[in-house]
Image: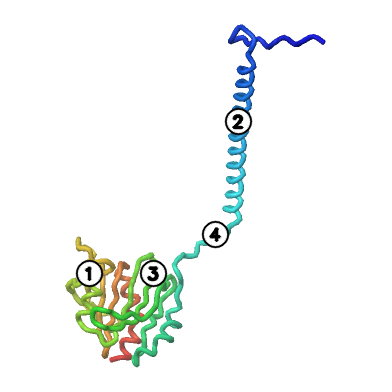
């Protein structure tokens, strides 16, 4: 049987040595593995994108706000034990929603207050505070120690106005505030809402304010 002559490599102009043949075969094997790895990576990435697309299509979406809708009346009923006076639960029109309701105690002056946070129809914020046996220091703290800018009467109730909307000072949520007193309670409204929205919640507090006079 005739022996097959050694393979002549064009680049070399001569047959390969056994060492060169082994090196060539090893390099070809490495390149093949590299191509396979890249191919597998592309296939895995494509499969991941398909799975992600399926999940996006299957997960239901809703226009419901992510903020929790708190039942202020239910929380107030539980918290009523802290006060002999009725805790305010304003009856607000559609479009208002509560995202917080709780009793809060100020460590600075020891005042306990009933608090409810509301998001308005314009997606602004109003915080309602009912200070139980409150004092001027507590009120000043809520209003970031800003000064009163006037008074207004809403649904027969006189409120002191704190309008800081044009101020360049950092007043937190006290961009606008309304304050009134009734019996031993002090009602404070602060936030970023419009004047009309403040008047809406102030009017909704009228029954509670009048009941304590």
Give percent across and percent down for residue 182.
27, 88
Return the residue at label 3: 119
Return the residue at label 4: 61
Give percent across and percent down for residue 207.
35, 86
User: For the point 26% across and 69% down, which residue is it?
Assistant: 174
Pick the residue in front: 25 or 131.
25
User: For the point 26% across and 66% down, which residue is it?
Assistant: 172
Corner quadrant of residue 113? bottom left
Crowding at label 3, few (<14), some or many (≥20) Cα neighbours within 10 Å? many
Give the residue furthest to the top: 13
Quadrant in which the C terminus appears = bottom left
Q: In this view, does 117 lie above or below 37?
A: below
Crowding at label 2, few (<14), some or many (≥20) Cα neighbours within 10 Å? few
Q: Kindly check if marks 3 and 1 are in contact, taking CB atoms under 8 A apart as contact.
A: no
Q: Kindly check if marks 2 and 3 are in contact, taking CB atoms under 8 A apart as contact.
A: no
Distance of label 3 from label 4 (alpha carbons): 22 Å
> Which mark is nearer the camera, 4 or 2?
2
Pick the residue in front: 86 or 166.
86
Q: Residue 211's mark?
A: none
Distance of label 2 from label 3 (alpha carbons): 58 Å
Corner quadrant of residue 185? bottom left
Distance of label 1 from label 2 (alpha carbons): 69 Å
Give percent across and percent down for residue 59.
58, 57
Q: Earlier in the sequence, mark 1 or mark 2?
A: 2
Q: In this view, does 21 lie above or below 137?
A: above
Return the residue at label 1: 163
């Amino acid at each position: 049987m005739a022996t097959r002559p050694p393979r002549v490599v064009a680049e070399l102009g001569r047959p390969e040595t056994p060492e060169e043949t082994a090196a060539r075969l090893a390099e070809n094997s490495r390149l093949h593995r590299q191509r396979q790895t890249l191919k597998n990576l592309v296939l895995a990435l494509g499969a991941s994108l398909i799975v992600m697309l399926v999940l996006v299509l299957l997960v239901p979406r809703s226009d419901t706000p992510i903020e929790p809708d708190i039942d202020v009346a239910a929380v107030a009923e539980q918290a009523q034990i802290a006060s002999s006076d009725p805790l305010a639960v304003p009856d607000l029109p559609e479009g208002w929603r509560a995202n917080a309701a709780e009793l809060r105690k100020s460590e600075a002056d020891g005042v306990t207050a009933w608090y409810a946070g509301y998001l308005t129809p314009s997606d602004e914020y109003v915080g309602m505070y009912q200070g139980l046996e409150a004092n001027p220091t507590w009120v000043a703290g809520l209003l970031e120690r800003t000064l009163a800018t006037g008074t207004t009467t809403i649904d027969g109730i006189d409120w002191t106005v704190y309008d800081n909307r044009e101020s360049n000072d950092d007043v937190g949520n006290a961009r606008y505030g309304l304050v009134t007193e009734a019996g031993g309670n002090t009602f404070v409204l602060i936030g970023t809402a419009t004047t009309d929205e403040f008047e809406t919640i102030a009017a909704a507090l009228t029954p509670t304010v009048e009941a304590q006079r």
